[in-house]
């Protein structure tokens, strides 16, 4: 399977600009019908960052446990 670059419309870019600083990439991805890494990559290309102090408690524990190895039971 060959990967294709997703080209967002101006409306989709505006949605990412508005919501990325304070919402989970996975929630934005659900609306745009793409995967969360695609949203994150697009946001970085647009120079967007999360709002200072923003942390999604809904997803933080899962991210820490599954990807960093922290928080796992011994």
Image: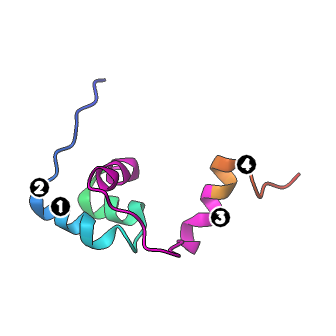
Q: Is residue 47 highlighted in magenta?
A: yes
Farthest right residue? Answer: 74
Image point 89% across, 51% down: which residue?
A: 74
The residue to which callout 2 is attached is 9
Q: Which mark is residue 25?
A: none
Q: Earlier in the sequence, mark 2 or mark 3?
A: 2
The crowd level at tag 3 (other Cα within 10 Å; few <14, some 14-19, many 20+) is few
The residue to which callout 3 is attached is 61
Cα distance in 3D space between marks 4 and 2? 37 Å
Q: Quadrant of the N terminus?
A: top left
Image point 12% across, 64% down: which residue?
A: 11
Q: Position of residue 41 (x, y in %)?
A: 34, 48
The residue to which callout 1 is attached is 12
Cα distance in 3D space between marks 4 and 1? 34 Å
Q: Earlier in the sequence, mark 4 or mark 2?
A: 2
Q: Earlier in the sequence, mark 3 or mark 1?
A: 1
Q: Earlier in the sequence, mark 4 or mark 3?
A: 3
Q: Which residues are magenta?
A: 35-63
Q: Are marks 2 and 1 in contact (CB under 8 Å)?
A: yes
**23 and 49: which one is in front?**
49
Cα distance in 3D space between marks 2 and 1? 5 Å
The crowd level at tag 2 (other Cα within 10 Å; few <14, some 14-19, many 20+) is few
Image point 39% across, 63% down: which residue?
A: 49
Q: Say whether residue 25 is left or right of residue 14.
A: right
């Amino acid at each position: 399977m060959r990967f294709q670059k997703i080209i967002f419309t101006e409306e989709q870019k505006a949605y990412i600009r508005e919501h990325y600083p304070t919402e989970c990439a996975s929630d934005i991805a659900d609306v745009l019908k793409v995967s969360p890494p695609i949203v994150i990559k697009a946001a970085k290309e647009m120079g967007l960052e999360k709002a200072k102090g923003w942390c999604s408690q809904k997803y933080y524990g899962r991210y820490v446990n599954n990807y960093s190895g922290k928080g796992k039971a011994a």
